[in-house]
Amino acid sequence: MTSDRVPADIARRAFDLIVVGAGINGAGIARDAAMRGLHVLVLDKGDIASGTTSWSTRLIHGGLRYLEHGEVGLVRESLRERERLLHAAPHLVRPLPLVIPIYEGDRRGPLTIRAGMVAYDILSFDKSLDRHRMLSAEEALHRVPGLNPEGLRGAAVYYDAQVEYAERLAVENALAARDHGAVVLTYARVDRLLIEDGAVRGVAFTDLLAEAQAGEEIARAAVTVNVAGPWVDRVLAGTSPGDAGSNGMGDRAAGRMIGGTKGSHIVVESFAGAPADALYVEARHDGRPYFVVPWNNQYLIGTTDTRYTGDLDRVEASDEEIDYLIAETNRVLPGAGLTRAHVTFTYAGVRPLPYQAEGVEGGITRRHVVHDHAEAGSPPLGGFLSIVGGKLTTYRNLAEQTVDAVFKKLGRPAPASRTAREPLPGGGPDFAAFGARFAAESDLPALSTDHLLRVYGTRAGEVLALASEGPDLREPFSPETGAIGAEIVLAFRRELAATLADALLRRTMVGVGPAAGIGADEAAAVIARRYLGWSEARAGREVASYRDYVARFRPRALATV
């Protein structure tokens, strides 16, 4: 790993826009800006989607419960964006039926649920998904036989969507940005803002993958957008992670902008009474809604919602959160009999919500804010925007609004955004036909064929083309997921991966399988030695580093190694 991945002339380039953060919002902003002709640089201290984007419940949804807080506009925006994503990325975003069981003693009774369902249908008048249906208790038990019948009053069935691999959604946005001329640098930590004459004129950053510290790198741009998610305040402070201090606030911050809340999930394999549809359930313990969702041939259960002030770089699900999710699932699905032994792995992340000192966590708005520091700062700073909040579902619209604001600051007319109608790299309106043709013509095992289509969409043929370099590249290096060797080569050569963790967790998606990539990590390192020129020492370091990273997920497979 050397610093030659950073363009030698980067300090002399005149970027229009620097995007700090390569989560779904940052990647979306970069794609939109590059497609509109701006010269864009993206910097992230980790990998694409290695923060909050990876730790959601992986739903593309209208936010049914936001109606309770009167956020009708946010629900309408979310439903409109859900429809756009179903068409732009059909390989990643698919319709998902959800069942809301209604029990005696629930805070939300049948009339409340029905009213919410009707409003949801009205606000999604232009949708392609089916309308809701109300079920009797008997009908609910017929649809979900594993439900607890005691006190069951009925249920509602409605449709949203699931993004199985939210990481890939961000990666494809970043790839599209790069293909339109953006420079995307991962593991490039922004240490400070370059402030000249009352305006941000760029950033100083460190290449964290340089073998020898080459010193501070400088990049300049007319506009900088701080879209670092939970780390927004840290970027404002102009400090490195080790000395963030005082909640990451610096003298220039007008006040704390981010008040993140923690969401934790558990992942389990199929169990007795496991539902075919997703369940949206009111927790008996605290009344908070949570989900039990079929996902990636497993079940995803979550999430929690508590204020968080710990280490942003290593967020973990606590024992209490794990026990809470297990207990609530066993209550609504009594045949499950889940224990900690059934948990294949866990994950947790911090939502980058607006700071709010008091109040119920679930009541904090999920609406995003494009904050112009020239209009509201202490002191004001020109050429600088910060993004607070935002949802996975509405990232595209957030990006469009942000890029419109960037053009305004540049003093240039803004070309119309094209992201609402142009598919992502693996998508397109002909995906279904492509998938049928690819499956019929592929001589790979069915598991591998399905995996390639779910992860890469219409780019699955690109993976097979790389496999021609060697017969072992057509073989699965991860038998449980069907991922083949050529995917490792693709990840590093064409998909901006820099570490084994990048390749397993956010490119091939092997790392979110039941074994969390344990075992497959060593097989992938062998492929990298053979086709990417890794030394034996580097291969060993990468496997060790990967296992250290995933230890925070408490994977069951790691405990048996």
Image: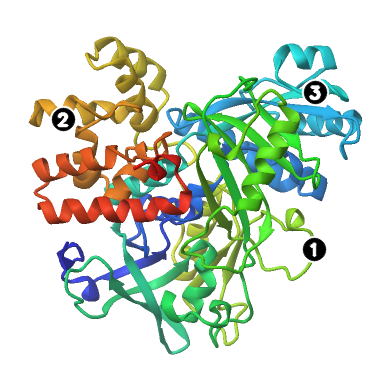
Tell me the quadrant of the picture where the C terminus can be found.
top left
Crowding around mark 1 (Cα neighbors within 10 Å: few <14, some 14 to 19, many 20+) is few
Q: CA distance from mark 2 to mark 3?
A: 48 Å
What element does badge 3 sit on?
Answer: strand
Q: Which residue is mark 1?
A: 359
Residues at circles 1 and 2 in contact by the CB criterion of under 8 Å: no
Residue at 67 percent of width and 54 percent of height = 366
Check disc 3 and report the residue beneath it: 155
Residue type, label 3: Ala
Going from N to C along the chain, the mark reached first, 2 or 3, is: 3
- Tell me, for residue 463, which label it has, or none: none
| Disc 2: which residue | 473
Give residue 388's quadrant in the image: bottom right
The kind of residue tagged 1 is: Gly
Q: Which residue occupies the foreground of this view, 551 or 405?
A: 551
In this rendering, position of residue 125 left or right of residue 239: right
- Distance from disc 3 to disc 1, alpha carbons, whole Å, reads 30 Å
Q: Nearer the viewer, residue 281 or 33?
A: 281
| Image location (x, y in percent) of residue 475 | 19, 25
Compared with 212, 134 (above or below) is above
**Vertical placement of residue 96 versus 345, above or below:** above
Of pointers 1 and 2, the one earlier in the residue sequence? 1
Cα separation, mark 1 vs mark 2, equals 54 Å
Q: x%, y% of residue 239?
A: 44, 80
Whole-percent x and y of residue 105?
Answer: 91, 35
How crowded pointer 3 is (Cα within 10 Å; few <14, some 14-19, many 20+) is rated as many
Q: In the depicted view, which residue is nearer to us: 501 or 426? A: 501
Question: Callout 2, which amino acid?
Answer: Leu
Which residue appears at 41% of the width and 57% of the height?
Answer: 22
What SS does tag 1 mark? loop
